Image (tube, grey):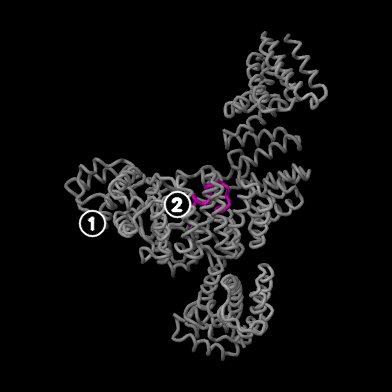
Amino acid sequence: MFEGFAMAVLASAAADKTTDARELYSRMERDKRISEALGPLATEFNDALGDRLRERADEVKSDALQGIAREWEVVGERIDGYEAAVGRDREEAVDRLVAEIGGAEVDGAEVTALPEETETELRELLAGEFAELMADFRDRVHGEEDLEHRFQADLEMNVARRLDEVIESFERMAGRRPYDLHDFPGERDAVLAALLTGDRVAFVDRKEVPAEPDPGRHVVLGPSGAGKSRVIAERVRRLPDDAVEHVLIPQDRLQDPTDAHSMADLSADGDVLLVWEDVHRLDERRENAVLEPALRELDRTLDGQGHDLYTLLEARSDRFDDLPGDVREDFGAEQTPWGEEAKSLWADYEPLWVEGLDVERVAELVDRTAEEYGVDFAAGAREALVERTADADSAPAYVKSVLAAEESPLTVDAVDRLPEKVGDVWRGHYRALQEDRPAEWRVLVAMKYLYDLDAPRYARLVEAVYRDPLDGDGLQFGPAVERLETRGWLTVDGDDLRAVGTRYEVHDTQLDAVDERAEHEARRLSDRLVEVVESAVPEGERAPVHNGSGTAFYDWERYGLAEEQDEAALDVDDRNPVSHNNYALLSHEELDDPEQAQHHYERAVEIDPEYAKAHNNYATLLGNELDDPEQAQHYYERAVEIEPEYAKAHNNYATLLKNELDDPERAQHHYERAVEIDPEYAKAHFNYANLLKNELDDPEQAQHHYERVVEIDPEYAKAHFNCALLLQEELDDPEQAQHHYERAVEIDPEYAEAHGGYAALLREDLGDPDEAVGHYRRALDLWLDEGESLQTVSLAVSELVDACERSGRPEAAVPYCERALDLCRADATDVPEGVEERIRAACERVG
């Protein structure tokens, strides 16, 4: 008979739809048809959980877990018959089961309480196993028509939908699903509430939102404050009921690359609309580690299930550079700019430009916003504000910024004094706060500091930063927040102004006006975060707060503080793979501790075997610092197996194959994949060009990729130099070579090799010995100061003498001949054969 935990969970999940969960449980228990079909699930679940407990006990060497695992047969029997698990709160299921395990007899003694770390391990295991159990349960119900009808009759609900909710609940508890999946159209209001948190201005109709919009694949673009979020929300509001089955909204913490592959686990009943705001922030560090992998994974997953993916992504139009690929070129493109077939992520996405409002819509917006904020107009002021706003791209934000903060009644003179840009309006408000309302100013600075640290602005965390390092008066914090909310500076997401879990939100235009920088207070901020995060941030977000802060400190080159945050993240959650990867990267690149880096990379890939970024980073450590190219190869292969579109891993793997494993053909394959996946990946183009030039003897293709590098990054001096050298030595194109040499030394005047190469071109190919002398002398100044090899110096001296003779100025070479001979005498025992003789011969030619 199936009387185990699955029935208890189902009854618990359905309790809000039925009269009594315990009565429902009993009715299910008596149903022999259900029992015969589903009974084996209880045994399978207990066996799987027992196996996982044994594995985990060995991993963490926990005596308490090992004791439970040894006595699992006894403990498992108690769980299987545990009717007390039936409750009205789904999370109560795990609470009761943990308590039941804790009350079992282990090694002959009753365990009345589990150690905290043991209980944490149990909760994670249980949540993960229950999610899989519920999925299996759902599949079996779907396969039995009689069962489905009986469940619908008994539970008065749609079984599949309710089971999905149960699965989602347990996966959240296991930290495995960093997104919300809403049924559509049934949960349309919940989606709108999530998109319009705290927004107090009604939508005014605009052409970007048709009466019944097509879901499509859209990227909503426009300047800050143009109303992009309202356009997205209104499109969802007007979407036909049969357009999609689900709306998916990623949570804030889906900024970690390890979460991108969570999309592969999504199970949908139909087409999905992905609504994702501020996507330009996801890959600000330009690693393309979140947005593109998540979109491709979700696309593949849904396609495999026979469903379509639609999108409403949102980004600021001035932040194209923070998106992967060349968005401007690739929207709807059939070919890349250099004539190859387009592979860009954006080829089948449509830009939806949010443009300025016409005068009629601006007037409507002004009236609605004035009513919301209780602002009256003096004679002519309304018309003056409409006229002032009509030409602004950011009209919604402009109107709100004025009417939320200006005194009532608004006068024509007040409108005339207003700046023309919304950002300048908020900067004016901010300066006024700084002078007149210091408590409110400190609240905003605290929020800006947390933004700089990539930390969510939870109320208690904002208050902690407000108090220290900003030395704010605690008694003034609550009133300051209330005034800021009233004046339109921030919105409060939560019923309790200062509760754990309550968040404050500020529009990006307003944050731009707060020009304080957190790095100035880095030391005190780090200390404060370590001190208060546990009490100021909900449990599941504590490690991500430390991770984001550690990354910010790393970017500010405050490596000791970054290490402090990485350690704090691991203190919170030692099984967080992102924390281990971050600490390993810091140890690897900045702390010169490869052994520590190796330990944390191994932990990251052990905890999450699908964490492609950690595999890539570990492979780089193995190939470079630990001199183990074979193991490095293994981890690069895993990285691109997990994430086939991971351009950086393909590039790194190709470099290992070229430099360490002498396999240029396979290196070519991975370089080609890297630039195919990310056509704007300058470093991959550069590395591929070097391979084509040096190993594969294909100078024309090498030139193509060097040219792509400097097209993507015109300041890439080394690419200019290599391209110039190729044009000079192999393609017999001295004019083009000259252009690239000139750019190389213009970008980097200290680039000795470029000066030397340019001098040789001028001397031999362009017949300009006077100009050549200058570049030879610059190259030798740098080489002699930097201790370059005597072999290189001797060749340059000889060529300088030749150029000086041709220009009729042999005396210009004398100082360099003398310095080179001095080096030979100083390093007499280490001078390569023939080098001193070459220098002496050159010197004799100039006297």
**Residue 655 visible to an observer of this rendering:** yes
Q: Could you tell me which secondary element the residue under label 1 belongs to?
A: loop
Residue 369 position in % (x across, y down): 28, 54
Horizontal side of 805 relative to 241 (left or right) equals right
Residue 556 position in % (x across, y down): 52, 45
Mark 2 belongs to which amino acid? Tyr
State which quadrant residue 307 falls in. bottom right
Marks 1 and 2 in Cβ contact (< 8 Å): no
Task: Return the residue at label 1.
Answer: 374
Mark 1 belongs to which amino acid? Gly
Does the magenta run of residues contain 656? no
Residue 462 position in % (x across, y down): 41, 57
State which quadrant residue 675 falls in. top right
Task: Return the residue at label 2.
Answer: 451
Q: Could you tell me which secondary element the residue under label 2 belongs to?
A: helix
Nearer to us in this view, 634 or 65: 65
Q: Residues within 10 Å of mark 1 (few under 14, many from 20)?
A: few
| Residue at x-position 50% and y-position 80% | 12
Highlighted magenta segment, given as a residue range? 276-291
Does the magenta run of residues contain 282? yes
